[in-house]
Amino acid sequence: MKLKYYAWLRDSLGCESEEITLPPGITTVGMLLDWLPSLGERYMRAFEYIDVVLVSVNSHYADRDHPVCDEDEIILAPPIAGG
């Protein structure tokens, strides 16, 4: 699975994207979001406010119940405000 990070997620994690292999049992966006902080301290900090992050699976916005698999591209982006 390819994960792409934007804005403060990218800054907190120190990378724009990474490839991961899902562990057994991770089958939805929600499970993925709940699992990512277990990867270490920088992930815990980055995903502290995960409830506001927009998730896209293969270029389509997805909610927590959306299925995921190792072949997916996931974009994680905080909402952007302008003025």
Image (cartoon, helix red, strand yellow):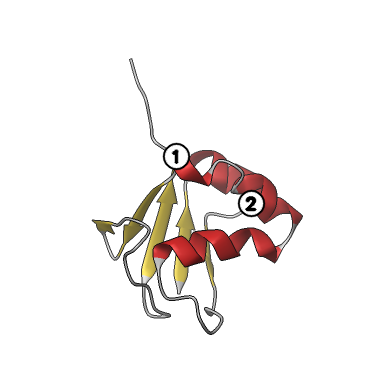
The residue lying furthest to the bottom in this view is: 24
In this image, 58 relative to 17: left or right?
Answer: left
Query: Percent position (x, y) of residue 65?
Result: 34, 63
In this image, 4 relative to 67: left or right?
Answer: right
**Foreground tag (2 vs 1):** 1
Residue at image position (51%, 46%) is 50
> Quadrant of the rendered structure where residue 66 is?
bottom left
Query: Percent position (x, y) of residue 34?
Result: 55, 60
> Quadrant of the rendered structure where residue 71 is?
bottom left
SS state under label 2? helix
77 relative to 58, above or below: above
Q: Which of 42 and 29 is in front in this view?
A: 29
SS state under label 1? helix
Query: Percent position (x, y) of residue 41?
Result: 75, 54
Residue at image position (63%, 51%) is 13
The residue lying furthest to the top in this view is: 83
Query: Label 2 belongs to which residue?
Result: 13
Query: Label 1 belongs to which residue?
Result: 52
